[in-house]
Image (spheres, rainbow, N blue to C red):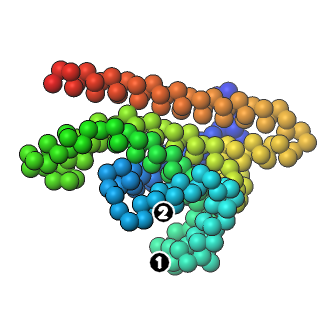
Amino acid sequence: MSWLTPFEREALLLSLKVALVAVAIILPPGLATAWLLARRDFRGKSLVDGLVHLPLVLPPVVVGYVLLVLMGRNGPVGGWLHDVFGVTFAFDWKGAAIASAVVAFPLLVRAVRLSIETVDRGLEDAARTLGAGPWRAFFTVTLPLAAPGVLAGALLAFARSLSEFGATITFVSNIPGRTQTLPLALYSLTQSPDGGHGAFRLCVIAVVVALGALVASESLARRLARRLGQGARDA
C-alpha cells in the first residue's frame, strides 16, 4: 500500500476492519435466519421475512437514527451496555461495524436462504433416519451443500459493508481516525474546495476494492460448486 497516502490508507484499513467485523457479527444469526425461512413454516413468517429485508428499503439515515436512539449512551441498549460492560458504540468504529452489519444482513440472509432451498430435503431426511439430529444434519449435510451460497452471501455482505454511508454517518458521525471509513472520507473530500483530486483517488480505490470483492465472490462460489459437484459424482 505504499502508493496510498496516509489519509487513504487509514480510511481503507478502517473500512476493511469494519466490513470484516460486520460479516463476523451477522454470519451466525444470518445462517440461522436463512435456515428458518427456508425450512420452516410458522405463523408470522411473512412478517419475519419483511423485518429481515426492511433495511434494504428503508433510507439508511433511518437505520442510523434508530441505532443511535437504541444504542447511544442514553439509549436503552447502549446505556445498559455502557453501564454494565463499559462498551460504547455511538461515535466509535464498533458502531460503524454494527451499522454495516444491519444493512448487510438482508443480503447475506437472502443469498444463504436461496442456497439452502436448492438442497434436496431427501438428503437431510436420510441423515435424520441414520440417527443424525437436526443440528448434525444441518452442519454435515445442509451447510456443506449450501456452502457456495454462504460464501457468496458473506462476500456480498462484505462488499455492502465497505460501501455503507448513510447509517454510519448518522450513528457514529464522521470522525477521522475513529469512524471515517472510505465512503465518509470520500464525502469529506467532496466538501473541500481543493479535494477533487483526492476524492477521485478514493473513488477509484472504492471501485477497485468493491469490484474485487464481487469478482472474488463469484469465482470462489463457482469453484466451490464445482468441487461439490465433483465430490458428488465421485461418491
Say which amino acid is labelled 1: Val
Instruction: Name, please, the residue furthest toward the right.
Output: 193
Q: Is residue 50 above or below residue 188?
A: below
Quarter location, residue 141: top left
Name the foreground residue: 140 vs 120: 120
N-terminal of the two: label 1 or label 2? 2
**Residue hosting label 1:** 84
In this picture, residue 65 sits left or right of residue 155 = right
**Residue 82 picture location, percent across and down:** 53, 74
**Residue hosting label 2:** 47
Dot 2, how many residues are within 10 Å of its Cα: few (below 14), some (14-19), or many (20+)?
few
**Residue 161 picture location, percent across and down:** 57, 46
Q: Residue at x 40, y 25 (%)?
A: 222
Q: Residue at x 22, y 24 (%)?
A: 231
Q: Is residue 121 above or below residue 73?
A: above
**Residue 95 picture location, percent across and down:** 58, 60
Quarter location, residue 60: bottom right
